[in-house]
Amino acid sequence: MPLIVVTTSPRVAPGLLSHQAWQALRSGPVLTASGAHPQLPYLAEAGIDVEVTEPDPRALAVRAAGETVVWLAEQQDGEDFMRAVGHAAVALDEPPTIEVVPGSYDLPGARVLDLVAVMDRLRTECPWDRKQTHESLVPYLLEEAYEVLETIEQGDYPALREELGDLLLQVVFHARVAEGFDMDDVAAGIVEKLVRRHPHVFGSVRAESADEVNDNWEAIKAAERAAKGRESVLDGVPMGQPALSLAAQLMRRAERAGAPESLAAAIGQGVARELFDLVRRAAEAGLDAEAELRAAARAYRDRVRAWESS
């Protein structure tokens, strides 16, 4: 006789089960270890009785040897429990077959729900997390962003996964701290923006090249700025970013707006003017001045370290 183990995802609304799972749940007595299993009300509504019992691996295996038994697993019914059931089954003279039927699957991105839930609990129960504000979290946001940048620059892609997680935490943290919106609002906002700015994907606009996509993007951004009452093409440029990248972004925005190059000549003389000119030269060469200086700084660091160890 078979032991059918029906698994469900805690990230999918209860009651939304696969056809195969519903068939399995009607094939024999259904057992579970918790009277609080989220699927129980929906099974009861479907006329399926569920017996709540102790999670005894041997008793479960013995019962399945005599009849078809369905075990409605919970998230905490992990590998250790199922391994114990397997060992108990093979120890019997006539062991039951064990079949796992997924009742629901995680969709891509479903683990973000776990992060939101963990953050909600931390914000409620952890004294440190509870006292944080948007302002107090700023240093961590910047630090995590630069750590992501460093792993990319070093080509350390295995480490990139962890660093992106740390950065994602900051986004979820700020969304949890906020009083006027939450993580769903944040996600909804960026989804709406991406759909709106990609009419060649989600609409009828045609764009055959990356340059055409970029032109469409800038035209849509300009229309959005006008709708929001922004008068300058430079509105929205974050002035707190590193100086080289700031200068490069200001130049790009001004150039797209058709600003004359003579404006740059009026910014003064000395080191500041020389740095500004270097940013322009880098842009004309297709280079990122900030990244180039960072690369030079890393090379200098390595040379100093080599000198120290010689």
Image (spheres, rainbow, N blue to C red):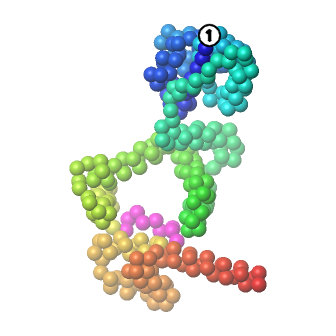
Image location (x, y in percent) of residue 130: 65, 44
- Farthest residue in the bottom direction? 270
Q: Quadrant of residue 249?
A: bottom left
Image location (x, y in percent) of residue 270: 49, 90
Q: Residue at x 41, y 44 (%)?
A: 188
Q: The residue tagged with tag 1: helix, strand or loop?
A: loop
Q: Residue at x 70, y 20 (%)?
A: 89
Residue type pointed to by label 1 = Glu
Image location (x, y in percent) of residue 243: 50, 75
Image quarter hosting the C terminus = bottom right
The secondary structure that most of the magenta stretch takes on is loop
In this rendered view, identify the residue nearer to me: 146 or 309: 309
In this rendered view, identify the residue nearer to me: 48 or 98: 98
* Bounds of the magenta segment: 234-244
Which residue in the protein does label 1 denote?
67
Q: Residue at x 34, y 49 (%)?
A: 195
Image location (x, y in percent) of residue 91: 74, 21
